[in-house]
Image: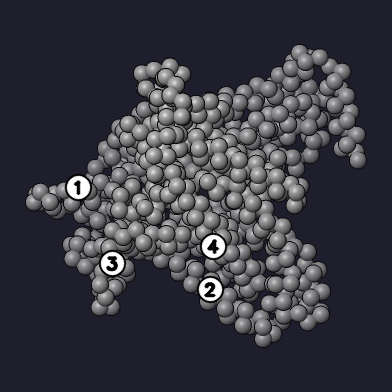
């Protein structure tokens, strides 16, 4: 290793090029977030006159105030998103680890059959149309909060990660507990789960992120504003206000001067805020999950 | 060897037992599987059965099974609509660009991150690159709005201050392939390079030490050791991605384009077409036919590519 660290000419050139490219990519990756923050704190009049900028000419909190002024929508969306994320993540962790545990048990006679049963759904699926009709007509998902939780409760990919991880826990633990007469569910709950904390952290974060960022289920199944999630609320805000304003312009009606533009940016910040806050602490679990997942299930 | 004899022993013990005996011995494990099995039947296997809708005239009141059969009529209308080819072409071309450009950049940055010195900065760079992975396409659409909006966008303000004309990006289908490819690559760069970086850090360090002793420079080490060592991973990732080439990223195309009819010629993919057709209830038949077509073609490509992986490197085959 010591030899590699020597700063030879080629290494210096490589470092210069590498640093320049990395700095460029860092700017490209962070700048959009900065622009949104700037937009969210800029005074509405300035945005209307000069547009979004690279810095804040006139500071204003109106966008955020407007977001929080209407508790029936934004705060409700926050509540719904938190509820769906917590319940969905917990249920999803239980489903994926329990299934993964059974499927890696070498003494379970039908493990290959069941593994294929789950795996096949990654290869072939019915697509949106039958899924949508099934959920709306037969499962009565319209405006049902379950529609936001159930569809993502069992990601096969997470189950495969769980299975791969649990395979590395020595079989002797299960075997000796069996000899002592323990039941399989208790072995999973009391012995295997405490040994799987890194796994739980990883797939829990995968799941939580998926639920937090989900707009698709809400768009398909929810009409009732009270049940909107943050992402879907933001989606509607980005789209509908523009349409409304255009319509009003055409009809010559003045929309009351609401800080709509800064509100859109403020709403974006409110939506991603929690992710950005926990990001530094959870990032390493994601990296770990990727490396576990890279191993074939 | 030990494992082999053990699994043989297990197999013998299975065959000596009756089916009901096996069930009762494994009843707790089977019960533990039950929730996932029910979930998968309801949300995955029932919709597969629902594919028959492509051959039916769906009427909400009659349900999937009560609706009358119409043979190939839905497919006939789909073909006559002239949409099938443009959406297939767009889906394939976009995915192909995503795969090639994404992979090249992910590998390049994984190599840069592994070779460059300065641990702190590397960590910071990796974190920044990973950040876009954590936001939804809705938020990306908000970012695009901030940058590209005709009257208020940052880009147009910049153009005006440089004395150039504003460009109305939301009114012009031409730049969209570049924008969409850029955004997809932007969002996937950190995630992809972490995967390749994990492979690179797992490589045998002795190879590099030997190369150092022989006086190899950085470039030689990259192109003679790192890149060749990554080839199996690259092949697998490539084949896996190609297997999904008929399945578009609905979130990206839907959130960024918002079904804007002016942009659709260059941005409509199978997934967005199916969604729009489904939502305008009169076209459910066509949506079902297009969805059926996508499911089947997707399945065939996966099977074909998996067969190819099996030929090249059986260890990496999906099944």
State left or right for residue B277 relative to residue B214.
left
Question: Is there a contact, CB below 8 Å, between mark 4 and mark 2?
Answer: no
State left or right for residue A238 relative to residue A19.
left
Alpha carbon separation for disc pair 4 and 2: 16 Å
Chain ID, mark 2: A
Eyeballing the image, is A203 above or below A27?
above
- What residue does disc 4 label? B101
Alpha carbon separation for disc pair 3 and 2: 28 Å
- What residue does disc 2 label? A21
Q: Does dot 2 land on a helix, a strand or a loop?
A: helix
Question: Is there a contact, CB below 8 Å, between mark 3 and mark 4?
Answer: no
Tell me whether marks 3 and 1 sit on the same chain: no
- What residue does disc 1 label? A244
State left or right for residue B212 relative to residue B284.
right
Q: Quick one: B20 or A102, which is closer to the camera?
A: B20
For label 1, count other residues whose C-alpha is less than 10 Å away and answer few (under 14), some (14-19) or many (20+): few
Q: Which scheme is used to colour this image of the protein?
A: one colour
Q: Does dot 4 land on a helix, a strand or a loop?
A: helix
Q: Does dot 3 land on a helix, a strand or a loop?
A: loop
- What residue does disc 3 label? B167
Earlier in the chain: of badge 3 and badge 4, it is: 4
Q: Which mark is residue B116?
A: none
Q: Which residue occupies 35% across, 51% down?
A: B264
Earlier in the chain: of badge 1 and badge 2, it is: 2
Alpha carbon separation for disc pair 3 and 1: 23 Å
Tell me whether marks 4 and 1 sit on the same chain: no
Eyeballing the image, is B36 above or below B24?
below
Of labels 3 and 2, the one closer to you: 3
In which image quadrant can residue B165 be found?
Answer: bottom left
| x, y percent for residue B272 | 41, 44
């Amino acid at each position: 290793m010591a030899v590699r660290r020597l700063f030879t000419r080629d290494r210096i050139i490589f470092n210069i090029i590498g640093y320049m490219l990395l700095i460029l990519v860092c700017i490209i990756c962070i700048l959009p977030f900065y622009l949104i923050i700037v937009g969210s704190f800029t005074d509405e009049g300035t945005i209307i006159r000069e547009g979004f900028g690279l810095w804040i000419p006139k500071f204003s909190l109106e966008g955020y105030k407007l977001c929080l002024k209407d508790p029936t929508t934004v705060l409700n969306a926050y509540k719904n998103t938190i509820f769906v994320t917590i319940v969905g993540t917990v249920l999803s962790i239980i489903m994926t680890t329990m299934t993964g545990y059974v499927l890696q048990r070498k003494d379970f006679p039908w493990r290959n059959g069941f593994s294929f049963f789950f795996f096949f759904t990654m290869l072939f699926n019915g697509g949106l149309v039958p899924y949508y009709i099934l959920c709306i007509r037969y499962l009565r998902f319209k405006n049902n909060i379950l529609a936001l939780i159930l569809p993502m409760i069992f990601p096969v990919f997470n189950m495969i990660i769980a299975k791969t991880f649990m395979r590395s826990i020595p079989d002797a633990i299960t075997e000796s507990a069996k000899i002592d007469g323990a039941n399989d569910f208790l072995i999973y709950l009391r012995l295997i789960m405490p040994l799987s904390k890194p796994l739980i952290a990883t797939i829990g974060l995968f799941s939580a992120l998926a639920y937090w960022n989900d707009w698709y289920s809400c768009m398909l199944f929810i009409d009732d504003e009270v049940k909107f999630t943050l992402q879907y609320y933001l989606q509607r805000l980005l789209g509908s206000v523009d349409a409304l304003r255009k319509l009003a312009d055409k009809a010559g009606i003045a929309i009351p001067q609401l800080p709509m533009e800064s509100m859109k940016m403020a709403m974006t910040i409110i939506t991603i805020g929690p992710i950005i806050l926990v990001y530094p602490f959870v990032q390493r679990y994601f990296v770990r999950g990727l490396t576990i997942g890279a191993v074939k299930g | 060897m030990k494992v082999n004899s053990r699994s043989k022993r297990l197999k013998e013990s299975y065959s000596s037992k009756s089916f009901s005996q096996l069930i009762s011995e494994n009843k707790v494990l089977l019960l533990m599987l039950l929730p996932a099995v029910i979930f998968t039947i309801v949300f995955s296997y029932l919709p597969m059965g629902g594919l028959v809708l492509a051959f039916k005239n769906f009427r909400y009141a009659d349900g999937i099974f009560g609706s009358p059969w119409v043979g190939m009529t839905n497919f006939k209308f789909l073909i006559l609509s002239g949409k099938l080819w443009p959406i297939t072409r767009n889906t394939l071309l976009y995915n192909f660009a995503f795969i090639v450009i994404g992979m090249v950049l992910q590998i390049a940055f994984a190599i840069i991150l592994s070779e460059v010195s300065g641990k702190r900065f590397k960590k910071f760079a990796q974190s920044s690159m990973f950040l876009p992975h954590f936001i939804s396409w809705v938020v990306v659409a908000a970012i695009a709005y901030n940058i590209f909006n005709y009257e208020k966008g940052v880009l147009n303000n910049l153009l005006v201050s440089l004395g150039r004309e504003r460009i109305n990006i939301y009114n012009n289908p031409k730049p969209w392939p570049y924008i969409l490819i850029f955004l997809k690559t932007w969002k996937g760069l950190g995630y992809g390079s972490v995967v390749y970086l994990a492979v690179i850090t797992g490589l045998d360090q002795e190879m590099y030490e030997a190369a150092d002793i022989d006086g190899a420079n950085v470039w030689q080490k990259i192109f003679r050791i790192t890149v060749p060592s990554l080839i199996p991973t690259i092949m697998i990732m490539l084949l896996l991605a190609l297997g999904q080439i008929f399945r578009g990223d609905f979130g990206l195309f839907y959130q960024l384009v918002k079904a804007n009819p002016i942009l659709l010629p260059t941005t409509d993919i199978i997934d967005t077409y199916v969604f729009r057709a489904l939502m305008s209830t009169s076209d459910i038949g066509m949506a079902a036919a297009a969805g059926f077509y996508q499911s089947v073609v997707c399945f065939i490509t996966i099977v074909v590519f998996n067969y190819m992986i099996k030929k090249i490197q059986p260890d990496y085959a999906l099944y």
